[in-house]
Amino acid sequence: MKDIIKNILEYAVNAPSGNNSQPWKFKVKENKIYIYNVPDGDITPYNFDQKGSYIAHGALIENISIISLKYGYSANIEIFPNKNHNDIVAIITLKKTELKENQLFDHIFNRATNRRIYQKTPLKSEHKEEILKIHQEIDKSGKIKLIEDIEKIKKVAWALGLHERLIFENEMIHNIVFSSVLWSEKENAEKRKGLYIKTRFPDMPSFMLPIMKIFKSWLFVNIVNKIGLAKKIQKQSAESCISSSALCAILIDEETNEAYLRGGRLLQRIWLTATKLGLSIQPMTGIPYLARRILKGDSSGFLPKEVEFVKQANKTINDIFNENQKTIIIIFRIGYDSKPPIKTLKLPPNIVFEE
C-alpha cells in the first residue's frame, strides 16, 4: 500500500500552482492520505488568504482521484476536516475497487501552460460542449463561462494585459515575477520550483536570454519605461489573448475555502479535458487576484494610481463575465496550437509515512 500511495502522489503533484509554488505536503497512515497546505509556499500578493493555494490543492486532489482509479482504488475525499485548522486541506481514504480506465489519466503529465500565440480558430462545437458540461460532472455549484465574441475578448484582453504592464511598472510585482524565474534547462531540472523561462517565452531565441536577464534589474526597467516599454508589453499580452478561440472563467457563489478548492478541481478537469482534445490553455488571473487583495483592504506595494488601474480593469472583466455577481476565481485563454507546450518540472512530493 505504501508504494502504491507513493506512486499516486508522485504523479499527482503534476498540478498547477501559483508560480509553480507547489504549496503542499503529505502524511500517510495506512490507507489515508492527509494533505496539508504550506502557507509559506506562496507568500505573493496574488495568494491573499491562501485562496490561490486552495485552488492548487483542488487541482492536486482531482489528480489523486483520477490516478487512484488506475491503481484500483476509489478516493473518498473529506475537505477541510478540521474547521479550526485550515492547513489540513483534505483527508483522502483509499478503498479497493475495480480497476477503471480514465481517459484523462494519460494527460496529467502532459498538461502544461501554453503562452504562445494561438491559431485564430473558433472552438469546435463538440469541444465547447464537452468543456461546458464538466461542471455538471464534478461541481454543480461552480459555473464555467466562455466568451467568444471578439469585441468582448478585446476588452477583457486589454484589462488582463494590465498585469503584464505592472510587471514592468510596479517594483513589488516585478521582483516577485523575476525572482521566480528559472533561467536555464539545468536550473529547471535542479530546482523544480518556479517558472522556467522557456515556458514564459517558449519561442525566444537563445541570444535573447542575456538581454532578458538584464530586465531583472529594477533600475534598468525604470530607465526603459521612459520609452513606453510597459504599455507595449500590455499591448502584446492583449494580442496573445485576442488570438485565442475563447476566454473562459470559473465562477463561484461564495468565497469559502471549500468553494475555491472545488473550483481548483473543476479547473484541473477542464485543463485535462482540453489537453485530451488538443486544446491549449494559459491562466491569466493576475488582475482578479490583485484586485481581490486590494478590495479586501490591502493595497500595500501599489501607488494610488495603480490601485485605480487594477480596480478599473477588474470592473471591465466582471462587467463582461459576471452577470450574476458571482466571484471569478480563475480566467484562462483557450485555443488551438500545433506546438506542444514546454513544461516546468515539479518537486517530488514531501511525504511522511506513519506506522
Image (tube, rainbow, N blue to C red):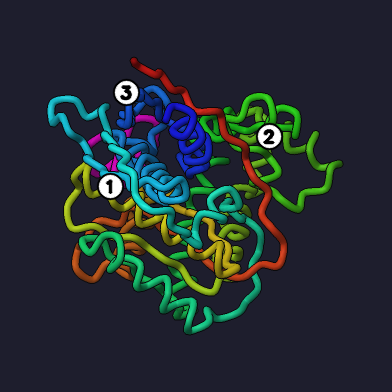
| Three-letter code for the amino acid on which mark 2 is drawn | Phe
Q: Position of residue 165 (x, y in %)?
A: 54, 48
Q: Nearer the viewer, mark 1 or mark 3?
A: 3
Q: Mark 1 near mark 2, Cβ–Cβ under 8 Å?
A: no
* Residue at position x 32%, y 68% in the image: 321
Q: Which residue is the site of mark 3?
A: 29
Q: Which residue is the site of mark 1?
A: 260
**Res 57 → quadrant:** top left
Check the image and name the residue furthest to the left. Answer: 83
Q: Position of residue 72 (x, y in %)?
A: 41, 48
Where disc 3 sits, the SS reads: strand
Q: Any mark on residue 216, and which?
A: none
Q: Compare marks 1 and 2 and give the one earlier in the sequence.
A: 2
| Three-letter code for the amino acid on which mark 1 is drawn | Tyr
* Residue at position x 56%, y 56% in the image: 107
| Left-right relation of 221 to 30 | right
| In the depicted structure, whether residue 59 falls above or below residue 253 | above
**Res 35 → quadrant:** top left
Q: Which residue is the site of mark 2?
A: 215
| Left-right relation of 28 to 18 | left
Where disc 2 sits, the SS reads: loop
Check the image and name the residue furthest to the bottom. Answer: 125
| Three-letter code for the amino acid on which mark 3 is drawn | Lys
In the image shown, does 161 or 219 lie closer to the viewer? 161
Q: Compare marks 3 and 2 and give the one earlier in the sequence.
A: 3
Q: Label 1 to label 2, Cα distance in Å?
A: 34 Å
Q: Compare marks 1 and 3 and give the one earlier in the sequence.
A: 3
Q: Please state the extent of the stretch shown in magenta in the rendering.
A: 290-307
* Residue at position x 29%, y 41% in the image: 294
Q: Mark 3 near mark 2, Cβ–Cβ under 8 Å?
A: no
Where disc 1 sits, the SS reads: helix
